[in-house]
């Protein structure tokens, strides 16, 4: 069986971003322009991908919650309309039995 590694962002990615950020700060302080340039673009690309994936997940969650809210409001209005419709069909009357 062939096991294939898939792209994923986990604790290692966050840790690497923290390490590269400190490398960027140190190299920028020491005026090492090439290392500062490479680490800055690594932070932009990898951090952007992580933020993009988190943004997509949050948008999906918000969209599904919005759809659920709309469905609940429609169901609530349908129940109100149905109860009013049933109430109009019945007549409440008192009667006496003659003996």
Image (cartoon, helix red, strand yellow):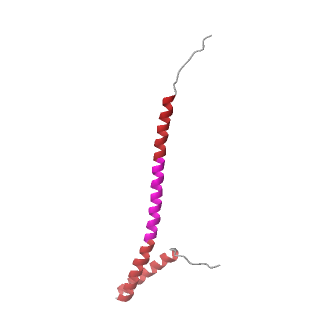
Q: Give the magenta range.
A: 51-72
The kind of secondary structure the magenta stretch mainly shows is helix
Image quadrant occupied by the C terminus: top right
- 29 is within the stretch colored magenta: no
Instruction: Residue 45: give x, y in percent of width and height.
Output: 41, 78
Please tell me whether residue 86 is drawn above or below residue 69 in the rendered image. Answer: above
Q: Is residue 25 visible?
A: yes
Q: Is residue 32 visible?
A: no
Please tell me whether residue 92 is drawn above or below residue 44 in the rendered image. Answer: above
Depth order, front residue of 6/23: 6
Q: Is residue 35 left or right of residue 57?
A: left
Asked which quadrant contains residue 18, the reply is bottom left
Q: Residue at the spot x=39%, y=77% of the render?
A: 44
Please tell me whether residue 87 is drawn above or below residue 22 in the rendered image. Answer: above
- 56 is within the stretch colored magenta: yes
Image quadrant occupied by the N terminus: bottom right
Instruction: Residue 8: give x, y in percent of width and height.
Output: 52, 74
Instruction: Residue 20: give x, y in percent of width and height.
Output: 44, 81
Depth order, front residue of 97/55: 97
């Amino acid at each position: 069986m062939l096991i294939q590694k898939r792209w994923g962002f986990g604790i290692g990615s966050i840790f690497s971003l923290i390490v590269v950020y400190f490398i960027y700060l140190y190299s920028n302080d020491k005026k090492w322009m090439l290392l500062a340039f490479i680490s800055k673009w690594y932070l932009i690309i990898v951090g952007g991908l992580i933020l993009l994936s988190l943004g997509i997940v949050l948008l999906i969650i918000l969209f599904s919650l919005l759809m659920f809210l709309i469905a609940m409001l429609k169901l609530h209005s349908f129940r109100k309309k149905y109860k009013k419709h049933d109430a109009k069909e019945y007549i409440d009357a008192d009667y006496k039995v003659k003996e």
